[in-house]
């Protein structure tokens, strides 16, 4: 069988899910989620990776050239929207940026915030530029963006413990905030659609590792559904990634109408298969810790376990459950793609 491109493998997964069209594949589509990890491949600091578009694109290109993932996820940090809304960020030399001050430390300032313009504000335009440039220099790659969803933006502006406390004591405020952050997330997604990039939303703090299923259904699900409905009207599919343990909300995630869901290692892949079958392409869920401290044999076992329960009658993409650690040894990502080529046929 001829070796297929990553784009064709990924396209086959979507066709299998939504059209029942079978395309003969050489192997399962696969990719590791590589963000800050890629900086080390070109000898750059993480600070340079986050602040300099050329460095970011160069690191992504180096990762693609070395590993040939079927999806090149343009994973940077997820604070650009919050920065544009007033968070003050700190950029350490060799770790991800953090918020030193929060725009909504005083919750009463919500009414003064305005939806930022992704083509003009803070580092948001540079992210759009990086996707355009990556596609120019890697035309054969499936270049895919990742941006924060409304709950992630809300927590970034307000702080996780404060927002959860607000949900219990002042739910109307949380709904007001979520209505606003949903418009922010939609605006970011629209800017991606304008450059012909399908939006993927990261909602790491929406998992049941942090909030209850009830809280997800009351304060997150309606806004995820609103985003999906907005883009469905434009015939644009969107993806959703949730880190941590998501078993109790898998059906809710699928019922938002997203075209793909990405799940982390704590989530039961068998349950995710049942929830997503024929409704969404399923992505995941190799334990990310294996890229730092695992052996090749342990990684092989994890891949085998995923493939053993992967759906045969719906689309599946093998991937790390979350972002590869920034200090992971590069050879362990080599292992992942080598094992995919060996075991995923």
Image (cartoon, rainbow, N blue to C red):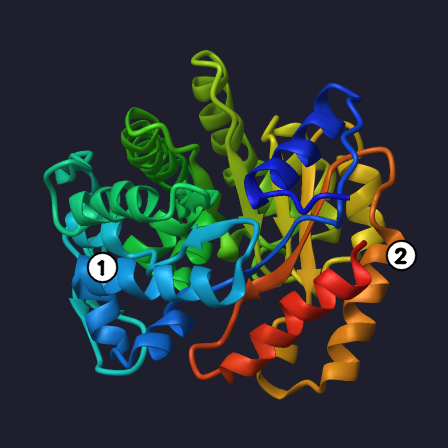
- The residue positioned 35% from the left and 32% from the top of the image is 189
- The residue positioned 41% from the left and 61% from the top of the image is 160
Whether residue 289 is visible here, answered yes or no, is: no
Q: Secondary structure at mark 1?
A: loop
Tag shown at residue 105: 1
Residue 132, by quadrant, is top left
Tag shown at residue 308: 2
Q: Nearer the viewer, residue 303 or 227?
A: 303
Count of picture labels:
2
Residue 66 image point, x, y percent? 48, 68
Q: Relative to 24, say whether 99 is above or below.
A: below
Whether residue 143 is visible here, answered yes or no, is: yes
Tag shown at residue 283: none
Distance (Cα) linking label 1 and label 2: 47 Å
Residue 319 placement, left or right of 329:
right
Residue 150 image point, x, y percent? 40, 41
Residue 98 placement, left or right of 51:
right
């Amino acid at each position: 069988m001829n070796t297929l491109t990553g784009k064709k493998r990924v396209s086959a997964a979507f066709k299998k899910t939504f059209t029942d069209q079978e395309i003969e594949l050489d192997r399962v589509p696969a990719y590791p989620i590589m963000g800050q990890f890629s900086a080390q491949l070109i000898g750059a600091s993480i600070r340079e990776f986050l602040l300099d578009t050329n460095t970011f694109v160069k690191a992504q290109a180096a990762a693609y050239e070395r590993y040939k993932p079927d999806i090149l996820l343009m994973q940077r940090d997820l604070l650009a929207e919050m920065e544009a809304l007033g968070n003050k960020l700190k950029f350490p030399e060799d770790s991800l940026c953090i918020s030193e001050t929060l725009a909504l430390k005083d919750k009463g300032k919500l009414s003064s915030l305005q939806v930022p313009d992704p083509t003009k504000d803070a580092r948001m335009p540079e992210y759009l530029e990086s996707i355009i440039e990556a596609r120019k220099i890697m035309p054969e790659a499936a270049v895919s963006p990742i941006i924060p969803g409304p709950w992630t933006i809300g927590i970034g502006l307000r702080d996780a413990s404060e927002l959860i406390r607000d949900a219990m004591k002042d739910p109307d405020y949380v709904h007001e905030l979520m209505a606003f952050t949903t418009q922010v997330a939609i605006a970011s997604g629209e800017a991606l659609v304008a450059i012909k990039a399908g939006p993927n939303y990261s909602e790491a703090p929406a998992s049941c590792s942090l909030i209850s299923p009830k809280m997800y259904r009351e304060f997150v699900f309606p806004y995820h559904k609103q985003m999906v409905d907005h883009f469905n009207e434009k015939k644009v599919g969107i993806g959703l990634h949730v880190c941590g343990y998501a078993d109790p909300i898998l059906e809710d995630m699928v019922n938002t109408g997203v075209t793909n869901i990405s799940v982390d290692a704590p989530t039961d892949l068998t349950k995710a298969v049942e929830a997503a079958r024929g409704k969404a392409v399923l992505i995941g869920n190799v334990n990310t810790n294996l890229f730092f401290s695992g052996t090749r044999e342990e990684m092989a076992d994890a891949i085998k376990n995923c493939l053993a329960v992967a759906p045969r009658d719906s689309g599946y993409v093998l991937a790390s459950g979350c972002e590869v650690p920034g200090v992971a040894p590069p050879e362990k990502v080599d292992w992942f793609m080598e094992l995919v080529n060996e075991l995923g046929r």
